Amino acid sequence: MVQEHVRHGPLDLYLRKHHGAVTTGWKLTVAKQLAYALNYLEDKKIPHGNVSAKKVLLAREGDTAGGSPPFIKLNDPGVSVTVLARDMLVERIPWVAPECVSDPGSLALPADKWGFGATLWEIFSGGKMPLSLLEPQRKLEFYQSHQQLPAPKWPELATLVAQCMEYEPQRRPCFRALIRDLNSLITSDYELLSDLSPTDVTLRDGFWGHDSLAMSQDPELFQERHLKYISLLGKGNFGSVELCRYDPLGDSTGELVAVKKLQQDSAKEIRDFEREIQILHSLQHDFIVQYRGVCYSRGMRGLRLVMEFLPNGCLRDYLQKNQPRLEHCTLLLYAWQICKGMEYLGAQRCVHRDLASRNILVESDSHVKIGDFGLAKLLPQDKDYYVVREPGQSPVFWYAPESLADNIFSCASDTWSFGVLLYELFTYSSKSKSPSEEFLRMMGTGKPAQIICHLLELLKDNRRLPAPAGCPAEVYALMMSCWAFAPSARPTFGQLAPKIEALRDGRSKTRG
Ligand code: ADP
Ligand code: MG
């Protein structure tokens, strides 16, 4: 569909960007124009169904001093409410009329009055709508318990909003009456009242509490439409990670973030993903990638995880690229940092299950962070899942024997994987020496479906990855200790850290 280009874009973004500069008179003018547009639709008996500041486009900014008013146009509603999936309807709370959430087919003229009430609220709060960022379930509860948006300070405006947002559709006034009421509002009363503060609506500490209100400053919940895709950072076994700019002002000044989404989104996986995110939010450590928040798009189906962006990417690629300048003591520094991060994870009763260089991220030359943890819990329990699809990249070569045989994962199986990660460090993640390549070589040619059995046999025979070329004997001894067949015989991360530190001290001394 080709549409006219409306110069200043959607009203909500404009309000947020210019919140200090926009006067109450300006907002009132915009509100009246919107009421006129909706009155026209009401006369024609055409319900719009998607009234919100986002759907109002600003054609002219206007100039208060010069006396020229702003000029807005109501945009088309997009896909009709009547055919929208339920999670997308829920996403539109509080703009969508409650009757449309329970029965989308019931879309009629009164729905636009509700939407207009919500939009009035939005316009006068400077484009903020905290409720819109709540989790879907909490939004639904808001409607189910017939809650109201907090009343604006301006009593006359509060009355208008309340009339529009009546839960009983028939009690909402017609637009002609709304225009009359808007015309009777005297802005000077309000300017005095609100002391010209940009956000002139007081929010009660009620329904959504402080946390969600703080969002505009430090968002834990990111809005999908402000996440601007830049590039694909990586595709792993469970999800894909994209580099995006979170740009709520729409002017490319927002920060870069890494956004992860699941490749599959069955109900169970979404539930698991959600639970994981809860855990990840509570983790704070120098050597663990920082989780910034979540983004709900299309309800839970499009749940995404937003985290800090590490421009140097994953350790596997980094090692390959920078081999010549990475000395052993740097490799040991990385190993120590990962070990400390794992020690912390273990203390939080969290098992990583997918520790490998592809899941370690590089912050700088001297700082790495553990990423992609917890997601491994979403693994389908049948082990063939990886083997059949992509044997070369399969994490099975990082798995401890008990994980291969019985799907048992613990801190001790993480230690095993850490040993493999040490091996990767000292081979600089060379493709030809990768754990997969080495093990496949040891096995000879086997059918992919039998890989796990073969691997297990091999490990039972006490065969292990070879010492990487040039790897110090003490370091290889450390790897081997991580690969003890019995989980209880492996060192803990708490025991490994000082050993690695001692080796590192030794390295830097011999060098010096
Ligand atoms: P998966 O669960 O799909 O394996 P990962 O979290 O391992 O997902 O991410 C896949 C790849 O995306 C990583 O190997 C890395 O290259 C890249 N990546 C992930 N997170 C970030 C980040 N925060 N910053 C930069 N790159 C990242
Ligand atoms: Mg990964």
Image: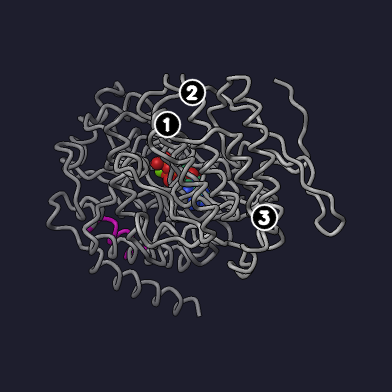
The single residue placed furthest to the right in the displayed view is 66
For marks 2 and 1, give the CA distance: 9 Å
Given residues 178 and 277, the one toward you in this image is 178
Q: Which residue is identified by label 2?
A: 108
Residue 87 picture quarter: top left
Dominant secondary structure of the residues highlighted in magenta in the image: helix
Q: Mark 3 to mark 1: distance in Å?
A: 34 Å
Q: Is residue 245 left or right of residue 131?
A: right
Asked if marks 3 and 1 touch (Cβ < 8 Å), the reply is: no
Can residue 316 be seen in the rendering of this structure? no
Q: Is residue 363 positioned above or below 68 on the image?
A: below
> In the visual, does 216 lie left or right of 23?
left
Q: Is residue 139 magenta?
A: no
Q: Secondary structure at mark 1?
A: helix
The magenta stretch spans which residues?
A: 472-481
Give the residue drawn at x 52%, y 37%.
Answer: 115
Which residue: 82% across, 54% down? 63
